[in-house]
Image: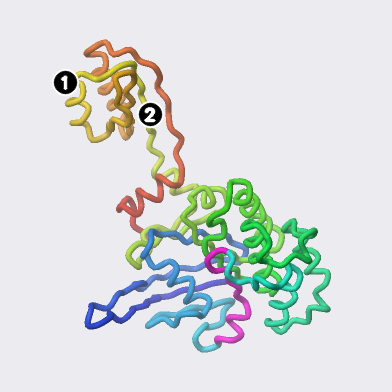
């Protein structure tokens, strides 16, 4: 559904400063009915890429195809397949009601709202906005506004949905609801969804595949499952009663895999990263040297936030 080849964007430097290459020759594809996470730290180039995909920014070089149509050469028909929700809830009009927003944005896409009454009703119910249909958008909660923003993107019947931080600022319940709705949209409607987010729980829960960019380049492009497996390093937290001796502290600080995370006269915790099982025994031997009473040994679960940090810090390269 989406094919990107050699995409580059350079912003000219201000007042004689060096130009900034925000996107540096990236290439990737997204299949029909795929929910892709497009991730990266601040300033990595992900938002610039999303804006190029929806036609807001023109690339310096490279090629974008949407549904087989070149976005530069056939801009209008290609963009007819794309809807975007940028910055959470910015694509709605605050003084229109929920239903009026759906009707208005459908009309902007050249669709007759009168012919879409069933679809409008469906999306209002689908996003649990049925009883808010006549409420102005500005009076809705943040979570409801973001649901309405996604509904506005869907009412256009476009095949590609670009979502920039769809759960930004939401509480746990609202974020969970958005995640479940996104998975249902992809599964039942076959839409292609690309989302950017800093919430790694959203990625792990919804995305089948992720692309991670850093400094304008792709540093990882793989399934969430494969990346979790790649960085599946066991991490244990060992807690003892009381303080460490100076010799114990020196021995632990000399180990790259061990970090003292809590240090008080009553309790001390050491986080141990196990790339080799021998490390755990080495730490326990240090603690045994002063007969430090063990309180607990807990294994931490691997999560995508740790994977993301490993990759951004140079843990894997790929395209």
Q: Nearer the viewer, residue 81 or 147?
A: 147
Residue 237's image quarter?
top left
Measured as percent of width and height from the top left, residue 240 is found at 34, 18
Residue 274's image quarter?
top left
Secondary structure under the numbered disc 1 in the rendered image: helix
Residue sitting at x 39%, y 33%? 234
Work out whether residue 181 can be spotted.
yes
Neighbours of disc 2 within 10 Å: few (<14), some (14-19), many (20+): some
Residue sitting at x 50%, y 61%? 196
Q: Which residues are magenta?
A: 75-88
Above or below: residue 163 compared with residue 178: below
Residue sitting at x 78%, y 66%? 134
Above or below: residue 189 compared with residue 56: above
Question: For this view, does 243 lie left or right of residue 295?
Answer: left
Q: Which mark is residue 236?
A: 2
Quarter holding the N terminus is bottom right
Looking at the rendered image, the disc whose residue lies closer to the viewer, 2 or 1, is 1
Q: Is residue 87 magenta?
A: yes
Q: Nearer the viewer, residue 110 or 226?
A: 110
Secondary structure under the numbered disc 2 in the rendered image: strand
Q: Earlier in the sequence, mark 2 or mark 1?
A: 2
Q: Nearer the viewer, residue 266 or 222?
A: 266
Question: For this view, does 218 lie left or right of residue 15?
Answer: right
Q: Which mark is residue 247?
A: 1
Q: Which mark is residue 54?
A: none
Quarter holding the C terminus is bottom left
Work out whether residue 182 can be spotted.
no
Measured as percent of width and height from the top left, residue 163 is found at 56, 65
């Amino acid at each position: 559904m989406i094919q990107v080849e050699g995409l580059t964007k350079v912003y000219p430097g201000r007042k004689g400063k060096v130009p900034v290459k925000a996107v540096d020759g990236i290439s990737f594809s997204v299949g029909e009915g795929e929910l892709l996470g497009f991730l990266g730290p601040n300033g990595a180039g992900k938002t610039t890429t999303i804006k190029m995909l929806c036609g807001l920014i023109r690339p310096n070089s490279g090629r974008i195809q949407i549904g087989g149509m070149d976005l530069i050469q056939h801009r209008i028909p290609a963009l007819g397949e794309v809807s975007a929700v940028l910055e959470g809830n910015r694509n709605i009009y605050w003084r229109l009601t929920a239903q009026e927003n759906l009707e208005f944005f459908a009309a902007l896409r050249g669709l007759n709202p009168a012919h879409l009454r069933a679809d409008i009703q469906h999306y209002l119910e689908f996003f649990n906005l049925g009883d808010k249909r006549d409420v102005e958008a500005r009076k809705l909660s943040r979570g409801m506004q973001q649901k309405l923003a996604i509904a506005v993107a869907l009412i256009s019947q476009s095949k590609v949905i670009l979502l920039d931080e769809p759960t930004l600022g939401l509480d746990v319940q609202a974020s969970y609801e958005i995640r479940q709705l996104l998975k249902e949209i992809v599964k039942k409607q076959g839409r292609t969804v690309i989302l950017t987010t800093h919430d790694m729980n959203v990625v792990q829960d919804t995305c089948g595949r992720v692309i991670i960019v850093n400094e304008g380049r792709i540093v990882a492009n793989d399934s969430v499952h494969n990346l979790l497996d790649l960085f599946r390093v066991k991490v244990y937290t060992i807690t003892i009663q009381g303080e460490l001796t100076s010799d114990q502290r020196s021995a632990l600080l000399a180990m790259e895999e061990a970090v003292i995370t809590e240090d008080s006269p009553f309790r001390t915790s050491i986080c141990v990263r196990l790339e080799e099982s021998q490390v755990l025994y080495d730490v326990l031997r240090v603690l045994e040297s002063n007969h430090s009473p063990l309180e607990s040994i807990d294994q931490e679960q691997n999560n995508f936030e740790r994977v993301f940090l490993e990759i951004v810090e140079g843990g894997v390269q790929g395209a």
